[in-house]
Image (cartoon, grey):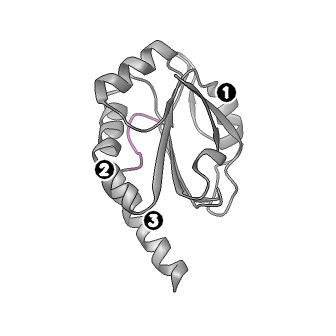
Amino acid sequence: MPPLRPGDPFPPLVLSLAGGQLDLPAGVSGHYGVVLFYRGSWCPYCNAQLRAFQRAAQSLAEVGARVVATSVDDKATTEALVAKLKLGFPVGHSADARAVAASTGAFVNEEPLYLQSTGFVLDPAGRVIVSVYSSGAIGRLVPEDVAGLVRYVREHHAA
């Protein structure tokens, strides 16, 4: 699958959550969506990114953005990470790395199997505004850029 480009519809994905599931992009419909694929709870860069998005929860809410994240980690590992980092946004577990990559173009690490860091910002209709693909440990969305981008898009669509 080639990378998702601005204007592309975000493909349907089902995230397994501790308390059920979240269908994307429907689960963020009507809001700007931030979809994060992270490498796993073991990744210090991923933990820093998830913490940063949690710290920015207020500024992201002010611009109408909703964050969701997922990885290949199992349910127990994900629940422990959510508790440790005190994450208030939905975090999925047990993602099928190859299936997610096939539908989104995300890079996959084969051994051990996991998704490389990938981030998307979606418009309220579920179309991609920006996609950030990493083939390794670094290179990812940061919340300040997301909030600024959403502000910019909102102002220019209103004009």
Residue placed most toward the observer, 37 or 114: 37
Residue placed most toward the observer, 35 or 82: 82
Is there CB contact under 8 Å for labels 2 and 3?
A: no
Marks 2 and 3 sit apart, C-alpha to C-alpha, by 14 Å
Residue 87 drawn at (x, y percent): 36, 34
Magenta-drawn segment:
136-141
- Is residue 58 in view from this perspective? yes
| Residue type highlighted by circle 3 | Val
Marks 2 and 1 sit apart, C-alpha to C-alpha, by 30 Å
Q: Neighbour class for label 2 at 10 Å: few (<14), some, many (≥20)?
A: some
| Earlier sequence position, callout 1 versus callout 3 | 1
Marks 1 and 3 sit apart, C-alpha to C-alpha, by 30 Å
Q: Residue at x 48, y 35 (%)?
A: 90
All told, the count of numbered labels is 3
Point out the residue furthest to the front here. 19
User: Which residue is the site of mark 1?
Assistant: 98
Q: Residue at x 52, y 81 (%)?
A: 158
